[in-house]
Image: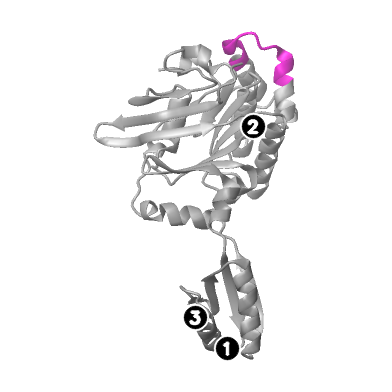
Amino acid sequence: MSDAPPIEARRLVKRYGELVAVDHVDLTVERGDVFGYLGPNGAGKTTSLRMMLGLITPTEGSVKLFGRDPHVDGARALDGVAGFVEGPRFYPYLSGRRNLRLLADLDGGIPGSRIDEVLDVVELRDRAQDKVGGYSHGMRQRLGIAASLLRDPSLLLLDEPTTGLDPAGMRDMRELVKRLAAEGITILLSSHILAEVEELCNRVAIIRKGRVIYEGRLDELLQSAGGEYRLRTSDQERARAVLLTHGVAGVELVDGELRFRAEPAEAEALSIALGRAGIGISALVPHTATLEELFLGMTEPEERSSRSLDGSEAPEVAAWPASERVT
């Protein structure tokens, strides 16, 4: 397989009449990434994923998977690539195993032993003979991943794989994603559950109104919001005055505690100054913003006015043969 990145989108645009759903998106997913793709409803996440998988054609720009463009190279571009958008679909009146057998036959050259392997990976072997119509939502999600794994992919795209799951199902799905990543599969994970992204992903992109407003390492994003401290004392008014005297700007009283930004050495000096002023310190702790706080700060204006373009499009399963997917 090519040494090119698993996903490389450049100036990617999708318009529906006057509505610009995806607006000149640049995105690179490197080998070994568990890459979080984040954004409010209607921001363009699912539309982007559809273009990446060849399910819809870009209005402008290009997307390449391991150096191949699904809109130019057709089925060959999807070798080693699988996943699902919005939710996997199966024949409810057939068993899980029979559904996988049909997909394997359509893809061609997939032995029956591979079906057993992927059922073991997603822990559905004991329910493989049951009709999918009797599966729980979480079981159907896991069967969707099993379908994607049939072709032994190097790149897996998962759109909201834990949506609608109970806490135990979400935990199981997270563990499954971790196992797949540990096996060397590059994963693009679209999710609105930010604690999940923070746990699983090493790199993220945040999309707002069709544009990527951040792409990079997750740890660097979290560190960029560091330097804030929270202070509780025996006399908050006097403590505030001490902070201001020592040149600390932007001191705020929030929920009974003083919040301010400072370097670690400055915070140490402030604690000494407060002690000398006879002000007791009950808490002086650094606060690192969570991904949720950062995400809301970057996207909240859109959250209040967005409407769900992504939710209006019918789900499709990228585990179906490439000839059925590329438009």
Mark nearer the N terminus (1 vs 2): 2
Q: Which mark is residue 32?
A: 2
Residue 70 x/y as whole percent: 46, 18
Of callouts 3 and 2, the N-terminal one: 2
Q: Amino acid at mark 2?
A: Gly
Measuring from the top left, give residue 262's x and y in whole percent: 56, 69
Q: Most extreme residue toward the top, as rendered? A: 109
User: Whole-Å distance between the Cαs marked 1 and 3?
Assistant: 14 Å
Examine the rendered structure and indicate whether residue 15 appears above or below residue 106.
Answer: below
Q: Nearer the viewer, residue 59 or 304?
A: 59
Please tell me which residue is depicted at 70% across the width and 24% down the height of the picture: 118
According to the image, label 3 marks what residue? 244
- Residue 223 at x, y = what percent? 58, 54
Determine the residue positioned at 38% across, 36% down: 312
Q: Which residues are magenta?
A: 103-116
Residue 113 in magenta stretch: yes
Alpha carbon separation for disc pair 3 and 2: 47 Å
Reply yes or no: does residue 304 show up in magenta. no
Report the residue that reaches farthest toward the left: 18
Give the mark toward the camera: 1 or 3.
3
Q: Majority secondary structure of the magenta segment?
A: helix
Q: Are marks 1 and 3 in contact (CB under 8 Å)?
A: no
Regarding mark 3 in the picture, which secondary structure is present there? helix
Gap between marks 1 and 2 measured at Cα: 51 Å
Q: Tag 3: Cα neighbours inside 10 Å, few (<14), some, or many (≥20)? A: few
Task: Name the residue at 52% across, 23% down.
Answer: 318
Q: Which residue is mark 1?
A: 235
